[in-house]
Amino acid sequence: MQTHILGYPRIGSNRELKKACEQYWTGKIDVNGLLETGKTIKNKHWKLQQEAGIDLIPCNDFSFYDQVLDMTLTLGAIPERYREIAARKHETDLYFAMARGFQKESMDITAMEMTKWFDTNYHYIVPEFQKDQEFSLFSEKIIEEFTDAKEAGIRAKPVMIGPVTYLLLGKEKEEGFDKLDLADKLLPVYLQILKELENQGAEYIQFDEPFLALDLSEKAKETYQWVYAEIRKHFPDLKLILATYFEGLNDNLTLASSLSADVLHIDLVRCPEQLDDVLQAVPETLSLSLGIVDGRNIWKNDFGKSLNFIEKTIQKIGSERVLIAPSCSLLHIPADLDAENNEEILSGEIRQWMAFAKQKVNEIVTLSKLASGDTDENTQQQFDDNRRAIEKRRISTLIHNHDVKDRVEVTTEEDAKRSSPFKARKRSQQDILQLPLFPTTTIGSFPQTKEVRNWRSKFKKGELNADEYDALLKQETERTIRWQEDIGIDVLVHGEFERNDMVEYFGEQLAGFAFTQNGWVQSYGSRCVKPPVIYGDVHRPAPMTVYWSEYAQSLTKKWVKGMLTGPVTILQWSFVRDDQPRSLTCKQIALAIRDEVTDLEKAGIRIIQIDEPAIREGLPLRTSEWQNYLKWAIEAFRISASGVEDATQIHTHMCYSEFNDIIQNIADMDADVITIECSRSQMELLNAFADFKYPNEIGPGVYDIHSPRVPPKEEMMELLKKAQAVIPAEQLWVNPDCGLKTRHWEETEKALIAMVAASKEMSKVPAL
Ligand code: GLN
Ligand code: ZN
């Protein structure tokens, strides 16, 4: 039985890669310094896996920015606008220009688009295709990494995005062709890469083809058959590993097992049910790689459970045809749990249930030893320790809270419903709120200046005491309230100065959440996130936001909007417990937020926003699963929102989303007002809302907060007119696209003054 890793996190346990990239971008180190850091990281990870006893150690899983962009450069699919840079600059600069744009030396070239990698929080750079797209071997990175590994004494397994997945990840930049038609031009370059790798002595090659676990068109299926038949024809002796993950093969099982690969990797964490079908279908020439250790989450593997899967497989196909692996690349989890050594941040009890990348590598090796009966005392010890940790976690009082479980139990459909329909609520709300036509508001946060962040870090270090910190935040909040009053915004916000991050802030105050010191995961390029860990039943020991909302409201006669993060977003942006369904955890969070909503109402807050920017990204990869997800996700939002009186107005906010295909579900959320990102798409999004006749109120963002540019009043009016053409004025709000936290005050002031003017003017314009 062999062991292998699909990919190792490259950011480094101290985020060495992030630091080196950022130093390179700001000119603090030169290209050799950067490449040197890359080499050190790669060597360290190879050695680590070698010492752990992994059989097939990956290479080319390292990347300075993104593995899809690496493939684009390898295949020479460089968009026309980078020609000049390609001619004038080092390959590394071309590479970063494609990732980040280039505004220097009299060039001003935009970056390539970035989007989410399947259902993860990792973002890849989208390949761009033209009708007459050509490919050629441009970057030799993959071959260099193989030879580097060889020098380090490792016959590595090169990994790369498979040809069909590569095409499916890309975007046609002009009309009149289908990206899959490019397969015959693409294939020769892949063959050339394989040839070089074979010449260098490569034995195994891993092609990542996650699309095999998704819904595929007939054409995509045919492309798969054709491409892999060609590869096999040219390379009868290379051992091909086809890696699928994030979903089960399901209807593509016959296709995947007929592609004449040597090894098929399946994700048994996401889809354990598929094992029986796969065992039925697998031809004798095909080995199976069991993706059994969770590459998407931070929990220790349950050896007992995993061994059952492995033994079942061995019985059916024999141990020579079995490989043990993580479910997917370990890119999506932090590097090393050993770096979590501060008991005050992460308690030993919770920590013993967890495993990061380095620990998971060891789990793989131990599992293979246990399954093959090759056990010494040490392995047996690990098995016993594992069983004890799993058992402790199962019964831990830290995790289980009977009050929470009982409350979930008695939550009914009624709890997910406001008392009256929207029309009646609107009347009660307007009686109290007395808002003008085209009311203005913002999405919540105001600029988090260096000063504000400085206060927080001083407070954390103990250089400011709680009273001093509180006084500074109050001062900033009051200033912001006064300023909004001065410029005439209708519904004010307190500015969120007390918050570090919209999920972390709530996680820190909810029971059932833990945090790490160093649990960084790459989000895109050098950008990393440190997701909270939901380990136990969630509840709210005390009010979380009432203090600040009440304070802000006390300063003004205008309405101040309470500001909360919704249950689906909190769930989506955390590492979630794996011992109960996500939907159940989400319901627990929903009840906690519901308590906060009703406490805000009691404190006199009449408008409360529950942000759900992540609702769409939680959509399952298989469309057949969508309705199930949407049902519990929307219900969770409604549970959080429905504890209030008719007269209390509930807002929600969403961004970065295409809503067209889930518009009905968004309406089902039944928020009184939704504010959405719209301006970058020039209100195209509104068509969805118009065709559908969105019933409640809506604030299409009238300016893009992602850029410092200040749009003139007229431009915002244009957008509002577009909106008014499809949605009645009585339903429209006026607001920016998203929170203003990343902006500076200078442009924020100008933009909001123009926005208020646009709203005033609009109420004078007669309707069409
Ligand atoms: N209320 C949050 C803010 O204004 C919303 C952020 C978001 O949508 N991502 O920052
Ligand atoms: Zn937003």
Image (tube, grey):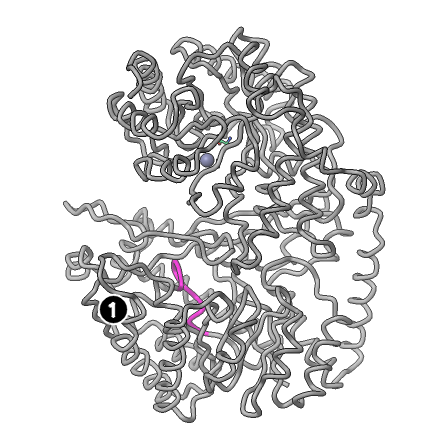
The residue at 49%/75% (across/down) is 58
- In the rendered image, residue 112, in percent from the top left (x then y), is placed at 29, 53
Majority secondary structure of magenta residues? loop
Give, as a single range, the part of the protein colored magenta: 59-67
Q: Is residue 326 magenta?
A: no
Residue beneath the point at 53% across and 43% down: 615
Front residue (pair 470, 562) = 562
Q: Position of residue 619 (x, y in %)?
A: 53, 52
Query: Would residue 601 be found to the left or right of residue 433 on screen?
Result: right
Can you see residue 472? no
Instruction: Pick the residue in front: 603 or 220.
Output: 220
Is residue 470 shown above or below 158? above
In this figure, which residue is indicated by the disc labeled 1? 76
In the rendered view of the protein, which quadrant contains the N terminus?
bottom right
Q: Residue at x 72, y 72 (%)?
A: 306
Query: Is 715 situated above or below 535?
Result: above
Residue 142 falls in which quadrant of the image? bottom left
Who is closer to the viewer here, 466 or 652?
652
Q: Is residue 187 left or right of residue 547?
A: left
Up-down relation of residue 176 to residue 440 (above or below): below
